[in-house]
Image (cartoon, grey):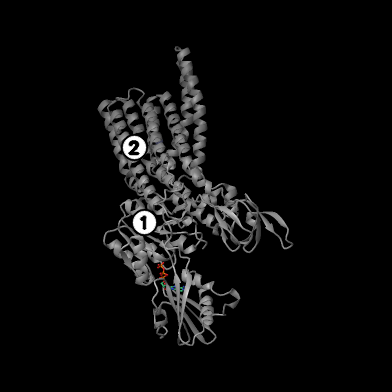
Amino acid sequence: MSATALPDSAAEALGQSDASKRPTLLSFAERSSLAVRLTLSMIAGGLLCIALIWRVTFPQDQNVSELVAGLAALLVTVPVLTAAWDSLRRPSLHGMSDQLVALALLACWATGDLITAALLPIVMIIGHVLEERSLLGSREAIGALGRLVQSSARRVGADGQAEDVPTQALRIGDRILLHAGDRVPVDGVIREGAANLDTASLTGESVPIEVHAGAPIMAGSVNLDGSLVVEVTRIGDDTTLGKIVALMHEAEAAKPPVTRLLEAYSGHYMVLILLVAAGVWFATGSTAAMLAVLVASCPCALVLAAPATAVAAIAVAARHGILIKGSAFLEQLAEVSSVVFDKTGTVTTGKLNLVRLHAMPGVAEGEMMALAASLGNESNHPVSRALAGIVAPDLHLPLQDVREDRGLGMHARLGDDRIAMGRPALLASFGIVAHDMPEHDGPMVALSRGTRFLGWLMLADEPRAESFEALEDLRKLGLRRQILLTGDRAQVAQRIGRQLGIEDICADALPEQKMHRVLDEVRDGFKPMVIGDGINDSLALKAGAVGVAMGAQGTDVALASADLVLMTSDLRRLATCIRLSRRCRRTIHVNVAFGLGWTIILIVLAACGLLGAEGAIIAAVVHNFSTLVGMANSGRLLLFDETGPAPRSAGINARGAVPTAA
Ligand SMILES: Nc1ncnc2c1ncn2[C@@H]1O[C@H](COP(=O)(O)OP(=O)(O)OP(=O)(O)O)[C@@H](O)[C@H]1O
Ligand SMILES: [Zn+2]
């Protein structure tokens, strides 16, 4: 089996000069040697036919047919022996079948059975090529992502004229022109125009999203209508698409635990098979039976069971806008036993807005707003983002030494004054008491300047439209243990919890406390899946059995600290993840059981001599058949599809699934 590497043009466009060095399941050398072996086995097959026809037509003249058969055998024996020799030096699971076939071949030569010596490798080589073909379906799906990279772009020059340039020539800050139907070549921000974007191939989201000036735009999406002027913000490997492609390659190279287990015992297996083969030979004296045992023992069906399934599952996940960083997480996902949600930006929209301002006597509201907006402008935190927009950008104040205290808030210097905004605890660390806390059941921050407490800013935050349905779906999958984590106040957390049906709430938590809550969960024997947006929850994401980052349209923290990334902010994808991983686990189990059962039965039949005089050839054919059945079973996973519109309960807003413009 081999890996379809990223198409060269795509790799170049992404600026990946070392695409060929990426880790894949099979190296380039192994792939090309398979092609050579296939060609040689075709020629050998032709020669073998001639030999057989000769033998039938001129039964008295055996020498010529023996000679031709010998030539055919020689053609295929040499590559098989070199492959076996290679696999001895660089042990791999799949190499084991090369070694077994090579042994069988040597035995054929020793006993002068030239027809078998030629036919056996031909059957095995053809089988392995078929294996490779059927893996291609899955690889195709992953490779398709690479092809989303557009190789040329229309750059707007200083004179306002557009010229076609290769995508690699684009630099950050360049402006490009996108017409209707164009695929977006790089990540950027829309400067002029409006359009509907099709992001389906990236996010699995079938509803096009509407974008206007100021909105971010991702490489790989398609401009359906309208003309856009886009300013380039990320190029090459740094684009979200570039990162996805890199993630996919990592995932492909990862070995599922089942495969690692098999590898650990491969030495023992080899010894066992040799003993059985030798035993059969001593007991029966039949070379045919011994050869059949060697061939029947090739563990291909077992070896391929897990990777073929994992690759298919990862491809299917990608189609749903779910990126899985390694196949190990697929198995862990299937075993998740509790779910931990972060509040802001995860179960709520994270698009907050200022609803009320509570100024201390003698404090001007305008001053508070200007200070809050200036500090807010320096952070990605949802509260800060909301506040940044409450005054026009030209009213922002010149701040110095801007700092963010994770989970607490922001502070900076303005002239001689220290200004701070965030939780009362942050102000307390500067010796300021935030008093007169108003009644409010949404997020709220305190603001201070110098030694003076200025007042409170109150914001509103609502659960996402699809949150309840998504959580209910998880509960139906048996994940009833759900926990809400937040740095926000208990009052807000409880209201949201009630709306969503979550009882277990951990409020007022700092980032480390969120992590400890997750670690407690692990210590109590649960396997928590932690879902967050990457802001003040990356520690918790790492602590979970599986960390899921949401709506990660390029946020680096999320991509770095999560094991799983959802391209959309649609919480319903979580249940999709769980269902897919459970399907994947079942498929692997079925394949392993089938491969193991089939191989053992075949070995027993071979050892008892029940496969007859041509046992080796029969074993080879049956072996290939079993491998293909397993591969076909893995391939069935590719049919998994939940991208279509999900059945919705009444009153749920269909547009709730549109990704947030981060
Ligand atoms: N950068 C910031 N700007 C303004 N306020 C902040 C900032 N960081 C933290 N805060 C304050 O600290 C509180 C806790 O923040 P934190 O991010 O831990 O929790 P959160 O906003 O409730 O989000 P989540 O539910 O995702 O944990 C916020 O409600 C806000 O009052
Ligand atoms: Zn095989």
Q: Residues within 10 Å of mark 1 (few under 14, many from 20)?
A: many
Q: Quadrant of ligand 2?
A: top left
Say whether marks 1 and 2 touch (CB < 8 Å).
no
Q: Position of residue 661 (x, y in %)?
A: 52, 61
Q: Secondary structure at mark 2?
A: helix
Task: Indicate the position of residue 89 as horizontal and vertical percent values.
Answer: 42, 45
Give whichever of discs 1 and 2 has the lower sequence position. 1
Expressed as whole percent of the image width and height from the top left, the position of residue 268 reads 30, 43
Q: Nearer the viewer, residue 189 or 282?
A: 189
User: Residue, x 46% and y 44% (percent of image)?
Assistant: 26
**Considering depth in this image, is 419 or 630 the residue closer to the camera?**
419
Q: Which mark is residue 595?
A: 2
The residue to which callout 1 is attached is 471
Pointer 2 local density, CA inside 10 Å: few below 14, some 14–19, many at least 20: many
Q: Is residue 6 above or below residue 547?
A: above
| Residue 618 located left or right of residue 198 | left
Amino acid beneath label 1: Leu
